[in-house]
Amino acid sequence: MAASYHARTNSLPSRQHPIASQIDDNLNRLRTSQSASTSSSIGHNLNGLQDLHECVDVLLQFPLTQQGLAQEKQREMVEELLDGSLMLLDVCTTAKVALLQTKECTQELQSILRRRHGAEGLANEFRKYLISRKAMKKAICKALKNLKHIQNKLSTPGENGAVISILRDVEAVTIGVLESVLSFISGSEAESKSSRWSLVSKLMHQKKVMCEEEQKANEILSVEAAVRSCIKSENMKHVENVQKELQSSELSIQDLEEGLETLSRRMIKTRLPLSHHALAHECADELLDGSLRLLDLCSTAKDIVLQTKESTNELLSALRRRKTGESEIVSEVKKYISFRKVSKKTIHKALGNLKVFISFVVPPLDKISNLDAINGVKKLNN
């Protein structure tokens, strides 16, 4: 770590500067807790990541930092970091969309369970829930691959300035935290751990205990396990267990949603060289809100198109198979209709958000001069 500090003194205000210490302290804390797998520990890491990006935002305002980044030899690395941060924002949006869909499915299932008494006839509703989870896991799998792509780029060696090294470290830690969020939502963390343990036959019992503990620690995975048990038995005791797990998961989903939303805003702010002038901050916040909403809408549209394509291909595949029975075709058609119903709800919500955004796009006349002032600040920074 001492060597790392020594390399950074060329661009930071000073080796002993508080912001340098804060950044390294936050990085070290997040590195040691990246294996977090519970909703509370992941939420804690999201808060820590917000603090880290806030420190970086302060660092980027120093004149010496801006001079270092403005050097010609740093241009390529800066562009790579900007590309990486944009991909991270896209992954962040995917995680938010997945949590939103999970919350909506959770609330819908809770509503159905409240209206119905007994376990009879609930199997179809539970299967719909599992179908939505399957589609969601595909989107998360793609996002995890994107994170791996960014990670591979970061591992490429090269001569970097002190500030660039810090920004690369921050990006690497951000990847780790977002990976833990996506793994928590999909339940893939528990699966990967169990597969590793299964290679060691003498520890099979420990593997079973570990998987059970992992399931309890992951509220979303616990709901899925309870739903599968209920489909097999249709026992009233299992239905009550599903209701209990749904209530528990709703609280953890809410906390993660709030953490990701705040992190998205902080990451966008880190990308922009904002002025400390109060007027510039006020107008820049409005622009940041707009850009965040547009990124969310764009990512939602991409996810829906991808999922529609996959559902269409699955249905076509079933129809092409000559040996496919009528009952199987009916089942595939029902799956497709169920998916379309969920996607239309998501699209309807996105269109509502777009309508709200449009009402704020054209600024009032008395703010035109304020926007001109921001443009002036940007030109000075460039």
Image (spheres, rainbow, N blue to C red):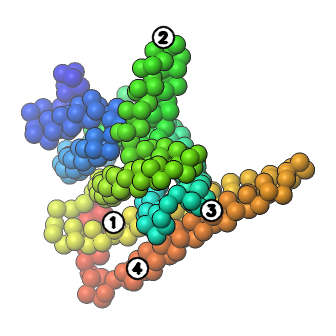
Instruction: Point out residue 88 in the picture as x, y percentages from the top left corner.
Output: 42, 48
Depicted 40 relative to depicted 262: above or below: above
The CA span between labels 2 and 3 is 43 Å
Which residue is label 2 attached to? 202
Q: Residue furthest top?
A: 202
Number of dots carrying numbers: 4
Please, what is the three-letter code of the amino acid marked with disc 1? Leu
Does the image show residue 45? no
Name the residue located 45 percent from the left edge and 34 percent from the top edge: 190
Q: Along the polypeptide, which appears first: circle 2 or circle 1?
A: 2
Which residue is label 4 attached to? 356
- Secondary structure under tag 4 reads helix
Which residue is label 1 attached to? 288
The CA span between labels 1 and 3 is 32 Å
Please, what is the three-letter code of the amino acid marked with disc 2? Lys
Is disc 1 in contact with disc 4, using a CB cutoff of under 8 Å?
no
Q: Tell me where residue 179 sits by quadrant.
A: top left
The CA span between labels 4 and 2 is 59 Å
